[in-house]
Image (cartoon, rainbow, N blue to C red):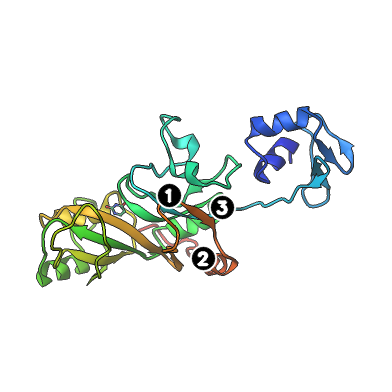
Amino acid sequence: MRLDKFLSEAGWGTRSEVKKLIAKGAVTVNGEPKLRPEFKTDPEKDLVCIDDSPVRYAAFEYFMLNKPAGVISASKKDMRNPRELCVVDLIKDNKRGDLFPVGRLDKDTVGLLLITNDGALAHRLLSPKRHVEKTYYVEISRPIDKDIVSSLEAGVDIGDEKPTLPCKLSPAPRILTAHSPEELRDRVFHITISEGRYHQIKRMFALFGAEVLYLKRLSMGPLKLDESLPEGESRRLTPEELSELMSVEAPYKGQPEI
Ligand code: URA
């Protein structure tokens, strides 16, 4: 692997930042200063140091972000306007250029977002074959009755090729949010869906004349939002959280994507 790629993936900065470190002579491989970013190093065997401190190589990194409203679910390279804030900008520990969000939340949706550079895990979690469950807290603009709840749970036609898959809806204790101070009886729910269609929850409620006023993702598969994490903050996953996520199996080969 190229030395600049190795250092960038190990968290020492973007490619151009690590190139400057290399050019300064701060980087040694097995005790020898290396001044060329294209120098080939073997992360398994070589001892790479920056200013005499060994560089620990982490191939993959995993962060939980409590996404705030107003931030776009995209990686830096997917942003049309690089000056606009994206979720990857909120990862404080991030010095590498290859992190991306696993799936997308709308700009005004808040809550759990997994940020990683592990493409295989992302594929497993997002695969339409796996039906990984995502639970949201939702506040809507008008009360809905039991019949509407049953229709939503059974699956509804939101104008896509197929109706939505069955989901679960239950009344939820209210989270205190500034935007909807009045009575919210029959307007606050937990909803668990196993798909990830564009604006899915908003479109499902809109069918019944209810606008989504507030949407917060609470969980994705086995990963639960750490409620002690303030909005806009992130932290690395714990080893336990990571091992639970890793237990989400890969889709069966040969099964059609549905
Ligand atoms: N459904 C939506 O409508 N928006 C989201 O951000 C997530 C699910």
Residue 34, relative to residue 73: is it above or below?
Answer: above
* Amino acid beneath label 3: Asp
Q: Position of residue 114 (x, y in %)?
A: 47, 55
The amino acid beneath tag 1 is Gly
Q: Secondary structure at mark 2?
A: helix
SS at mark 3 in the image: loop
Under mark 2, the amino acid is Leu
Q: Is ligand 1 closer than 8 angstroms to the Cβ of mark 2? A: no
Q: Residues within 10 Å of mark 2 (few under 14, many from 20)?
A: some
Vertical side of 107 occupied by 216: above or below: below
Disc 3 marks which residue?
118
- Where is mark 1, residue-wise? 232
Number of on-image labels: 3
| Residue bearing mark 2 | 245
First reached walking from the N terminus: tag 1 or tag 2: 1
Mark 1 secondary-structure assignment: loop
Gap in angstroms between the C-alphas marked 1 and 2:
22 Å
The image quarter containing residue 25 is top right
Percent x, y for residue 89?
Answer: 49, 41
Q: Position of residue 52 (x, y in %)?
A: 83, 43
Kindly report which numbered mark, 3 or 1, lies closer to the viewer in this rendering.
1
